[in-house]
């Protein structure tokens, strides 16, 4: 009798296991993964200008003093143009000997070179030519780069991400409909990032790439035309599939 009871119990347990396995298979998660992108084009309204003051003198003290004088004159000019102090900053500073290499001969000591970087945010682009000419006359002797930016980039980047997410949902709905399914809740969302130009004021690794249309000369308004900024966002989203 005891042996019969054990046999019945084993069969019952086995049936429970079978039911659970079958139930898990019936409820296996069905899902769809899509990728979508969106772009927003905006006009830049300010420029970030990176410059360097470089001075070379035989005496180390003279090199530093000459550099300090040129930097003060450049800063004074920027002040005369009503550029707010919060939009001007000094960066990289260097003072070191400079040697000129010669083939098969001893290098020649040229002097001590002092370097200091000045970065300017110009929000009135109509003054671009005047500012560049003025700081060059004041002692700046190298323009390292000019980036055209927009004060509404953060807002537009957020809107572009929303557009990309909506596009992903629309794409998922369309594809699911073709196989007689409906899209359920989102299971996973990730944003794709690509290498590209980045804001010099931001150091975070996950910065949305921004493509800048290269400016072309425009003789009607000056020597530069800012072009446009294209803000791109791309997302990959996974949704559950459900029966209609």
Image: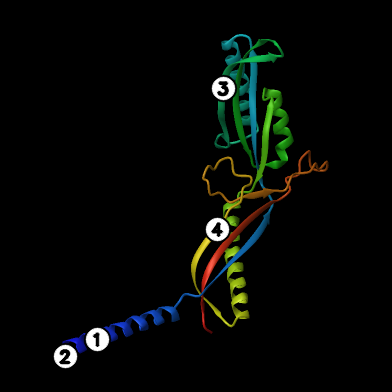
User: How many residues crowd around disc 3 within 10 Å: few (fewer than 14), some, or many (20 or more)?
Assistant: few
CA separation in Å, label 4 and label 3? 39 Å
> Residue at left 33%, top 80%?
17
Count up the numbered dots: 4
Q: Where does the image place residue 42, in percent across and percent down from the top left?
A: 68, 54
As helix, strand or loop, the secondary structure at mark 1 comes to: helix
User: How many residues crowd around disc 4 within 10 Å: few (fewer than 14), some, or many (20 or more)?
Assistant: some
Q: Is residue 82 above or below residue 58?
A: below
Identify the residue position indicated by label 3 in the image. 94
Q: Which mark is residue 7?
A: 1
As helix, strand or loop, the secondary structure at mark 4 comes to: strand
Q: Where does the image place residue 174, in percent across and percent down from the top left?
A: 62, 76
Identify the residue position indicated by label 2 in the image. 1
> Residue at left 60%, top 11%?
62
Of circles 2 and 3, the one toward us is 2
Nearer to me, 121 or 97: 97
Of circles 1 and 3, the one toward us is 1
Q: Which mark is residue 56?
A: none
> Residue at left 70%, top 28%?
134
CA separation in Å, label 1 and label 2? 10 Å
Query: In what quadrant of the picture does the N terminus appear?
Result: bottom left
Identify the residue position indicated by label 4 in the image. 191
């Amino acid at each position: 009798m005891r042996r019969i009871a054990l046999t019945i119990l084993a069969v019952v347990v086995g049936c429970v296991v079978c039911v659970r396995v079958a139930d898990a298979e019936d409820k296996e998660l069905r899902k769809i993964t899509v990728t979508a992108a969106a772009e927003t084009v905006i006009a830049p309204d300010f420029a970030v200008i990176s410059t360097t003051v470089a001075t070379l003198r035989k005496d180390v003290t003279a090199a530093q003093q000459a550099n300090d004088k040129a930097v003060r004159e450049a800063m004074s000019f920027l002040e005369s143009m009503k550029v707010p102090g919060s939009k001007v900053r000094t960066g990289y500073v260097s003072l070191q000997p400079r040697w000129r290499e010669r083939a098969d001969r001893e290098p020649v000591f040229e002097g001590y070179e002092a370097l200091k970087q000045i970065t300017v945010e110009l929000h009135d682009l109509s003054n671009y030519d005047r500012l560049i000419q003025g700081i060059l006359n004041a002692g700046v002797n190298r323009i390292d780069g000019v980036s055209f930016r927009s004060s509404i980039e953060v807002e537009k980047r957020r809107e572009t991400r929303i557009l990309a997410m909506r596009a992903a949902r629309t794409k998922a709905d369309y594809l699911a409909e073709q196989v007689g399914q409906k899209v359920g809740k989102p299971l996973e969302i990730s944003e794709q990032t690509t290498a590209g130009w980045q804001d010099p004021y931001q150091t975070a690794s996950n910065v949305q790439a921004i493509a800048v249309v290269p400016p072309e000369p425009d003789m009607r308004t000056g020597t530069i035309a800012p072009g446009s900024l294209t803000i791109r966002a791309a997302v990959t989203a996974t949704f559950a599939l459900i029966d209609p």
